[in-house]
Image (cartoon, helix red, strand yellow):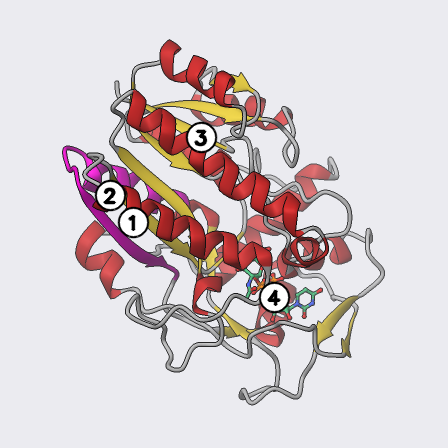
Amino acid sequence: MKKILVTGGAGYIGSHTVVELYNSGFEPVIVDNFCNSDKKVLSGIKAITGHEVTLYEGDCTDKAFMQQVFKQETLAGAIHFAAYKAVGESVAQPLKYYQNNIGSLLVLLDCMQAFAVNNLVFSSSCTVYGTPDQLPVTEKSPIKKAESPYGYTKQVAEQIIADMVRSNSGLAAIALRYFNPIGAHPSAKIGELPLGVPNNLVPFVTQTAAGIRKELVVFGNDYNTPDGTNIRDYIHVVDLAKAHVKTLQYLAGKSGFYDVINVGTGTGNSVLEVIASFEKVSGQNLPCRIGNRRPGDVEQVYAAVEKATRELGWQAGYTLEDALRDAWRWQLALAGKEGAR
Ligand code: UD1
């Protein structure tokens, strides 16, 4: 079985990817420092897959630690999730973001080169496109000036990886540009565990419906969209996880190769559509009101997904309703209520 290093493998997207790696016959090796994840996720992974996951607890910016992991394990590739991801926090604490998000990538690439591990899948984001000139956004769309240090770490990381590939290091890498990942595993055994008040729409929605938050504030309804609210491409986290496995399979045996691929559904939905869809699948009435625009929000963005289908043979299988139903089930499971199927 091919061993794959999964940095941030206990996190939201990482844990779902670990499950899909097992499902496809890979053996994931998690590196995580649990700064934004919980060890409970390991028992969730075991409950779904039957596997006791291999875990190295530590920080990806710690070179000696990472070298130990590479010495210990014969790796066929790596998926690099470990990073900070809060846009607002990155504006307030840019150094924290540059040190961690760039520092961890540099250490990882150094180890990969030293130990001749050639296949890398990198977690990038649609944020690199900024406000796109054309919709849907293709991979050929220009990279716009980053709105936040978080966004800039994704742009710089892509460039660093491209430079490494160009330097004849043997590296073969793909940056997956995620749109908006939502939902949870349909078993409700793993899902998102936001620390404190969630910044993202769907965890805020489910927490509001569960009575943890008083009301959802819709950030503006005066945008130039059909119902006035922002449009995003919401993708089920299990579909996104599967895209990583397909990407690894695609990279196998390649060297000196770099590409970027969008991972979304190809469909845009407004904030009000998400709320209506959530109310329908959960049977809950969601307390909400219209508030001011949130600074930095892009009016609308959704993916052109032909490249993922053409190159990886991947496309999203779940609908928005599926994802919201699974997000709600996970919220109920967290609350210990009768939520699972
Ligand atoms: C942002 C980043 C994305 C990043 C992600 C990680 C941009 C353009 N996108 O996604 O790159 O990976 O954060 O956290 O910077 N909304 C409300 N009320 C709420 C919360 C959200 O109305 O309480 C709305 C937002 O205005 C937005 C939509 O819901 O229109 C989605 O917001 P969110 O889930 O925060 O994701 P993005 O901002 O799209």
Residue 260 position, x and y percent, is 30, 55
Residue 280 is tagged as: 4
Tell me if 221 is positioned left or right of 189 in this view: right
The residue beneath circle 2 is: 165
Q: Count residues near mark 2 (Cα–Cα under 10 Å), then give few for <14, some for 14-19, many for 20+.
A: some
Element under disc 3: helix
Residue 191 position, x and y percent, is 58, 40
Figure quarter occupied by ligand 1? bottom right
Residue 316 position, x and y percent, is 35, 56
Q: Are marks 2 and 3 in contact (CB under 8 Å)?
A: no
Per the model, the C-alpha gap separating discs 1 and 2 is 5 Å
- Residue 341 makes an appearance in the image: no
Amino acid marked by disc 3: Val
- Residue 201 location, quadrant: bottom right
Q: Are marks 4 and 2 in contact (CB under 8 Å)?
A: no
Tell me if 17 is positioned left or right of 119 in this view: right
- Residue 131 makes an appearance in the image: yes
Q: Are marks 3 and 1 in contact (CB under 8 Å)?
A: no
